[in-house]
Amino acid sequence: MSRGAPEEVLAETTHRPWPLPGGRWVMTQSWLDLVFLHWRIPAVALRSRIPAPLEIDEHDGSAWIGVVPFRMEGIRLRALPPIPGTTAFLELNVRTYVRHEGKPGVWFFSLDAGNAVMAAVARKWFGLPYHAAEMSMRGSGDGGFTFASRRVGAGGPAEFRAAWRPAGEAFQGKSGTLEHFLAERYCLYAPSPRGGLVRGEIHHGAWPLRPAEVDIAVNSMLAALELRVTGPPDAAHATPGVDALVWPPHRIGTP
């Protein structure tokens, strides 16, 4: 996937559930070669883990928890040249879905990164629960990938090893569908290092999705959070990725 210029990313907005945020974006990123792996989970299992005033976002009567491995590339602050050693790394996040004041977004339980420096910076700058990890990813020649991650240092043992390949025609999730609910999220919520919560607005094109065949060899990412799911994912979607723009976080209140 070739990365688009910020002007090209901003030109595509009709798919957004609300207008572009005001102010200037501050960072570019590209999220590439993802697979969205999702399991149903009772909302009650997450209730104590989601701070007020956020509400758990449900679809078909269930909350959903996702494990998402991918490549992060093209990381650059606005008006600054790329900083060597910080522009690309592998990432694995564990997430669920919340909303506040009508805006659906993502809540991250953990984000493991193959770059310890970037993990530390993101944890301090945005208050996100980043962890350093040893990671590898390689293509399989049929459009698929294998991915391995093992957390190192603080945060407890957490490991993930899986292979996936696209299996089906490409599509974009339509409003009201599960695919749209899981993928089309244009903000995230996080604890503020100064207390309370922040919302971070983002923008990207609509996700190009394909059904995915997945073989998960090891997944202790949820066990590390003392959350339980069983069996294969209830939904699996592969995508070549999107280019994204990030706005600075804004405080929304106190838990």
Image (cartoon, rainbow, N blue to C red):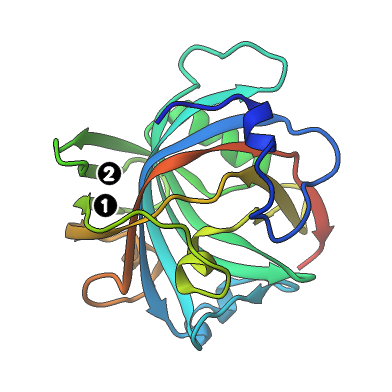
SS category of the residue bearing label 2: strand
Q: Mark 1 to mark 2: distance in Å?
A: 6 Å
- Measured as percent of width and height from the top left, residue 174 is found at 53, 67
Mark 2 highlights which residue? 149
Along the viewing direction, whichever of 206 and 22 lies nearer the viewer: 206
Label 1 amino acid?
A: Glu
Q: Quadrant of residue 216?
A: bottom left
Which quarter of the image is occupied by the C terminus?
A: bottom right
User: In percent of the image, x 43 and y 30: which residue is there?
Assistant: 116
SS category of the residue bearing label 1: strand
Along the viewing direction, whichever of 156 and 232 lies nearer the viewer: 232
| Mark 2 closeness class: few <14, some 14–19, many ≥20 residues within 10 Å | many
- Measured as percent of width and height from the top left, residue 248 is found at 75, 39
Q: Quadrant of residue 15?
A: bottom right
User: In percent of the image, x 37 and y 67: which residue is there?
Assistant: 38
Q: Is residue 252 above or below residue 39?
A: above
Which quarter of the image is occupied by the N terminus?
A: top left
Q: Is residue 47 above or below residue 243?
A: below
Mark 1 highlights which residue? 159
User: Position of 218 compared to 79: left or right?
Assistant: left
Dot 1 and dot 2 residues touching (CB under 8 Å): yes
Along the viewing direction, whichever of 225 and 82 lies nearer the viewer: 82
Label 2 amino acid?
A: Ser
Any part of residue 192 in sight: no
